[in-house]
């Protein structure tokens, strides 16, 4: 230990003299006595009165020592009290739910679609706002629950609505087969090149038939028979028909992630389908757009999940240019053929067109079925 590091030790007389000089302008009942009493009280220590006369220097030394000890303890308490609380849960970014995880028994895939439909009734006629909810159980072969509610009639473009309509209507379908469901898949007729498939009324059996192979799905989008009244079942579909098939399959919210991505890549390979990457939904969410010029309809899909976000129709023609469009995702199970280049375009909206889609979709996992 070096000499310059040795602290000077005061004698009792020197300490007494220093304190006397420091407090020369206060009396015997000075601030030090009050501070000591306050600090001891804050520490929860009850001070006993002095037993008898004490020397001034000794009393002041004890007061200083007690104050220092109490302050040290008080700072410890204060440090504990002032430690910032962990940020509240609401201040943390909410984790996005994993909608593709396996469901536990008692859970349901939930899809909500909001769109407009034509409604005529006593005293009113016009476009009705419609809300369609679908609950699919963890085992898709179980009973599906569909609820349809008409919420009002009015002007979709300007958002005006009339009185709410009666509803809701609840329907139940084992394995997704609801009342009025088309004939079972596999029905064939003389002259058809392919059997009937429930693309436009997807059920559990249809979903199970989809494989994540782009070329297989591309052929199915072109040639699967989807209408039992079609006299030439299996003929090549128009692009709008293929787009409608994809929309119906995606909007139930049950397809696996790899199937969704492969299905959209297959749609991009259908002749005349226009793909618009790095676009947005009418309300501004990032989206990849698939457009069928023959029917003027767009599908808006989430680039990250390949889920269907919205759908609407375009009143204006599209102008196109030939540009390569990459597949929608990184590697999937091997495809039997490469995806050809699609067409890239910009599809303008009509002046004054409302910034809402004809149909909007949302998804969740729930433990209730309505």
Image: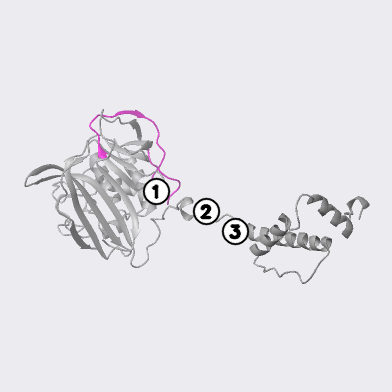
Mark seen at residue 42: none
Residue stretch rendered in magenta on the structure? 312-341
Q: Are marks 3 and 1 in contact (CB under 8 Å)?
A: no
**Residue 314, percent across and down?**
25, 34
**Residue 141, percent across and down?**
28, 64
**Residue 193, percent across and down?**
20, 49
Which residue is located at x 76 percent, y 61 percent?
63
Image side of residue 6 versus residue 163, left or right: right
Q: Is residue 248 visible?
A: no
Q: Is residue 340 magenta?
A: yes
Residue under pointer 2: 87
- Indicate which disc, 1 or 2, sits on the residue closer to the N terminus: 2
Mostly what secondary structure, the magenta segment?
Answer: loop
The quarter of the rendered structure image containing the N terminus is bottom right
Label 3 sits on a secondary structure element that is helix
Residue under pointer 1: 305
Mark seen at residue 81: 3
174 over 268 or under it: above or below = below
Which residue is located at x 74 percent, y 63 percent?
66
């Amino acid at each position: 230990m070096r000499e310059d590091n040795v602290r000077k030790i005061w004698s009792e007389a020197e300490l007494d003299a220093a304190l006397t000089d420091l407090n020369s302008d206060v009396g015997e009942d000075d601030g030090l006595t009050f501070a000591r009493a306050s600090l001891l009280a804050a520490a929860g220590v009850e001070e006993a009165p002095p037993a008898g006369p004490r020397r001034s220097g000794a009393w002041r030394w004890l007061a200083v020592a007690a104050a220092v000890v109490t302050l040290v303890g008080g700072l410890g308490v204060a440090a504990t009290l002032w430690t910032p609380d962990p940020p509240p849960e609401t201040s943390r970014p909410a984790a996005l739910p994993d909608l593709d995880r396996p469901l536990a028994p008692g859970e349901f895939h939930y899809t909500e679609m909001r769109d407009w439909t034509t409604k005529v009734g006593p005293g009113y006629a016009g476009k009705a706002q419609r809300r369609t909810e679908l609950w699919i159980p963890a085992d898709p072969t179980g009973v599906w629950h569909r609820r349809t509610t008409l919420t009002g009639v009015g002007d979709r473009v300007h958002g005006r609505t009339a009185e709410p309509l009666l509803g809701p209507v609840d329907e139940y379908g084992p394995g997704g087969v609801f009342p009025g469901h088309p004939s079972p898949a596999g029905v064939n007729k003389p002259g058809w090149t392919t059997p009937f498939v429930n693309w436009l009324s997807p059920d559990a059996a249809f979903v199970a038939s989809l494989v994540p192979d782009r070329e297989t799905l591309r052929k199915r989008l072109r040639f699967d028979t989807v209408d039992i009244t079609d006299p030439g079942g299996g003929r090549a579909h128009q692009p709008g028909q293929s787009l409608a098939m994809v929309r119906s399959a995606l909007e139930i919210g049950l397809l696996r992630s790899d199937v969704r991505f492969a299905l959209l890549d297959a749609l991009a390979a259908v002749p005349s389908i226009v793909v618009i990457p790095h676009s947005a939904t009418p309300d501004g969410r990032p989206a990849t757009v698939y457009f069928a010029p023959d029917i003027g309809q767009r599908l808006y899909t989430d680039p990250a999940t390949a889920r269907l976000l919205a759908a609407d129709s375009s009143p204006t023609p599209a102008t196109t240019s030939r540009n390569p469009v990459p597949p929608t995702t990184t590697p999937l199970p091997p495809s039997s053929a490469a995806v050809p280049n699609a067409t890239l375009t910009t599809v303008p909206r009509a002046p004054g067109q409302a910034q809402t889609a004809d149909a909007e979709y949302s998804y969740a996992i729930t433990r209730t079925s309505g």
